[in-house]
């Protein structure tokens, strides 16, 4: 693997750990990408970075001192988000600091000059709406390979540059809940646990998913199946079941038309895939909902990650 | 007092309470104003609203059921903020829910058509920069009366429409820390406690303060004195001392030039005004800093408010 180059964009102390934002060149996405990372107290508070300009974090030599490595939870955000929404709004770092867990927040699509965008400026296609798939259709296939980016490239980079071990969990919201479920169900050996808030669980039958998949993957619906959590959970082998938690607000304005959680729950029952579903009375689709229950999700993952 | 008219702009459930945003006509500011409010579980989750259109919250009759009233903490934000920054970023509602405290987040200046703004679009004058003073100079004096709004008008409205008692505390960040200190020191009978993050404590000698005060209050520096926490704390009567807490990051990029906390601490010592100051190593001026220690501040106020 090439030595990655990371550019530090910002750094803030919080809960005795560090919230940092980096830019790097992504080979899977063929563009520059930002991601955010929270480093809890007790691990090294900076990346091993290898860009030429040096600077306060530039170094080719491992640093002395703390060599503890922490497990990682990847958070996948929903439509319109960047790496910053969860970072700023969810209040997750407090519990991650307590549990000694690293949080990694990627962006939700490729970005930048030359990256295709929705011709009508729609929020549910193109920028901010990568849907965690590998696009096969022009013009999207040039850059929209978020599946590969999340499954392979970003974890490889994180594990090379930051004080983390290979214990991974994955979690997300809405489109990101779809991404977390699909990625964990297709790669159960790579994750210890998976959870989602308000996930799009059956995108091949619901409007957001049908729109995105037809553009990214073409009209042959057989090519969509591999990105549908409800189909994937039915196909999961019992030996590959992961701890799986879902929280869903019953006042979620997208539940009936876009999310269709009941289909996933039925599929889990049919397949005997154990899933813990919390239907939360009065809660909607917003980050206020996430902020209320994110602590529960992190503790759920911590147990699977053997972290405190 | 006239019957206030409140327009509900948004409502979200979080931590089993409610985060709501309202618009109302402010007489002190002579414009429409937004504010946000968090209602903890255990009190009525809606305003008594008196606007003509009715709607789900419209009612002239007191509602049956829960009649418990909670104490209130007013949060004053810093430069460039609206009522939403703290609401979204600080993570305060979790602890407020636990303590049974209402949080009220006002905007930081008058807004809207006809409200004067900085001619050069500066961030530190005009919109988002009211500095919690009553402006006496044209064109500002038409609307910029944030002192009266925070001290009198908003609490009167909150206490008429929401399930709160008359126990008040006040807290803020940067320009809002200045506002909280000045308002509490000038009105000790109205508050049980006061706290601040990274406050501008001596604005009559520092750049942000001098710029704002010269525009809002004119060139006669005697008219600035009543808005300077360092001068006010020296003049406070011992019988009117309030519990006072300050948190300040030592990596705050504004500490040396704009905040000058050491001057306030010296004045407190000279005046024998008890103050608890926490200098936090490595923390900056951001909401990540606030989010780390807001729980401590709410618990500090809860003790003074006799809330749990």
Image (tube, coloured by chain):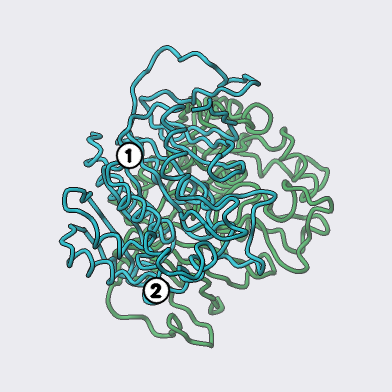
Chain colours: A green, B cyan
Q: How many marks?
A: 2
- Quadrant for residue B156, please give it: top left
Q: Residue at x 77, y 48 (%)?
A: A122
> Which secondary structure lies at badge 2?
helix
Mark 2, Cα crowd under 10 Å, few <14 / some 14-19 / many 20+, is some
> Which of the pair B23/A99 is nearer the observer?
B23
Q: Report which residue position mark 1 lands on.
A: B168
Residue B238 lies, in percent from the top left, at 16, 53
In the rendered structure, the answer to whether residue A70 lies left or right of residue A174 reads: left
> What quarter of the picture does the C terminus of chain B occupy?
top left
State the separation of the CA atoms marked 2 and 1: 30 Å
Q: Residue at x 74, y 54 (%)?
A: A126
Q: Residue at x 55, y 78 (%)?
A: A5
- Chain hosting mark 2: B
Q: Report which residue position mark 2 lands on.
A: B205
- Quadrant for residue B22, please give it: top right
Query: Are the two marked residues, 2 and 1, in contact with CB atoms closer than 8 angstroms?
Result: no
> Which secondary structure lies at badge 1?
strand
- Chain hosting mark 1: B
Q: Residue at x 32, y 39 (%)?
A: B168
Mark 1, Cα crowd under 10 Å, few <14 / some 14-19 / many 20+, is many
Residue B80 lies, in percent from the top left, at 54, 59
């Amino acid at each position: 693997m090439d030595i990655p180059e990371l550019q530090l964009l910002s750094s803030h102390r919080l809960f005795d750990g560090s919230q940092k934002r980096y830019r790097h060149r992504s080979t899977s996405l063929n563009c520059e990408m930002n991601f955010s990372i929270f480093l809890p107290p007790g691990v090294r508070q900076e990346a091993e970075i290898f860009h030429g300009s040096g600077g306060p974090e530039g170094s080719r030599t491992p640093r002395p001192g703390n060599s503890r490595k922490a497990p990682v939870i990847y958070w996948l955000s929903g439509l319109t988000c960047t790496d910053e929404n969860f970072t700023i709004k969810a209040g997750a770092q407090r519990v991650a600091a307590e549990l000694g867990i690293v949080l990694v927040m990627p962006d939700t699509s490729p970005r930048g000059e030359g990256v295709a965008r929705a011709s009508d400026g729609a929020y549910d296609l193109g920028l901010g709406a990568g849907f965690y798939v590998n696009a096969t259709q022009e013009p999207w296939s040039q850059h929209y390979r978020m599946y590969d980016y999340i499954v392979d490239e970003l974890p490889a980079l994180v594990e090379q540059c930051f004080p983390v071990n290979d214990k991974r969990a994955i979690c997300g919201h809405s489109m990101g809940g779809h991404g977390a479920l699909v990625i964990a169900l297709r790669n159960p050996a790579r994750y210890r646990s998976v959870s989602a808030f308000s996930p799009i669980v059956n995108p091949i039958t619901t409007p957001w998913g049908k729109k995105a998949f037809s553009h990214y993957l073409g009209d042959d619906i057989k090519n969509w199946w591999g990105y549908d959590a409800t189909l994937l959970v039915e196909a999961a082998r019992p030996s590959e079941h992961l701890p799986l938690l879902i929280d869903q607000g019953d006042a979620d304005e997208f539940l009936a038309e876009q999310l269709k959680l009941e289909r996933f729950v039925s599929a889990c029952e049919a397949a005997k895939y154990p899933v813990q579903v919390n239907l939360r009375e009065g809660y909607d689709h917003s980050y206020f909902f996430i902020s209320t229950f994110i602590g529960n999700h992190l503790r759920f993952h911590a147990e699977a990650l053997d972290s405190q």
